[in-house]
Amino acid sequence: MHYQVAPHEEAKLVRCTRGAIYDVIIDLRPESKTYKKWVSVELTADNRTMLYVPEGFAHGFQTLQDETEVFYQMSEFYDPECARGARWDDPAFGIEWPGEHGHVISAKDRSYSEYLL
């Protein structure tokens, strides 16, 4: 689950242009009524649905088909000093991922050994 902190918090617009993904966002704004809550949506090339990820939210996805492609538009440039992440399986969030997970997790995502909250 990826996000950037101030001064480079970013909003994202995400679309699946080929294949399918299970896309998840988590509200990380402590003052929000939905703090630590998550929402998911299936994005596919066929349904052409897009997901808006507001500033202050973490974002991650699981591919549901081989050869899947994802298209992002972001409001800020990537800044490694502001880049942060949370584990996809952090019990503070209780995200329900479809099917079996953990087959292929990027090295970056595996590096988040500590739980966020």
Image (cartoon, rainbow, N blue to C red):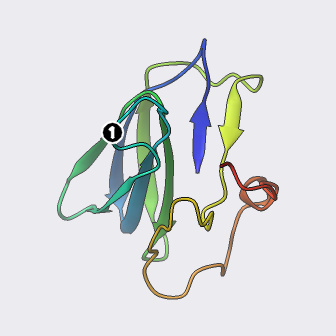
State the image coordinates of residue 43 (x, y, percent, origin top left).
Answer: 29, 60
The reply, left or right, for residue 89 in relation to residue 49 is right
State the image coordinates of residue 81 (x, y, percent, origin top left).
Answer: 77, 22
- Total labels: the figure holds 1
Instruction: Count neighbours of disc 1 (C-alpha within 10 A) and say few if under 14, some if 14 to 19, many if 20 or more.
Output: few
Closer to the camera, 80 or 89?
Answer: 89
Question: Which residue is the site of mark 1?
Answer: 33
Residue 62, compared with residue 83, is above or below; it is: below
Residue 96, compared with residue 25, is above or below; it is: below
> Dot 1: what SS?
loop
- Determine which quarter of the picture holds residue 107: bottom right
Q: Residue at x 29, y 45 (%)?
A: 51
Residue 34, compared with residue 43, is above or below; it is: above
Of all residues shown, which one is farthest toward the top?
7
The reply, left or right, for residue 42 in relation to residue 49 is right
Of all residues shown, which one is farthest toward the left?
47
Q: Residue at x 33, y 39 (%)?
A: 33
Q: Residue at x 27, y 61 (%)?
A: 45
Q: Amino acid at mark 1?
A: Lys
Closer to the camera, 100 or 78?
Answer: 100
- Determine which quarter of the picture holds residue 34: top left
Q: Residue at x 33, y 54 (%)?
A: 17
Residue 1, compared with residue 13, is above or below; it is: below
State the image coordinates of residue 22 (x, y, percent, origin top left).
Answer: 39, 66
State the image coordinates of residue 42 (x, y, percent, origin top left).
Answer: 29, 65
- Determine which quarter of the picture holds residue 18: bottom left
The reply, left or right, for residue 39 in relation to residue 59 is left
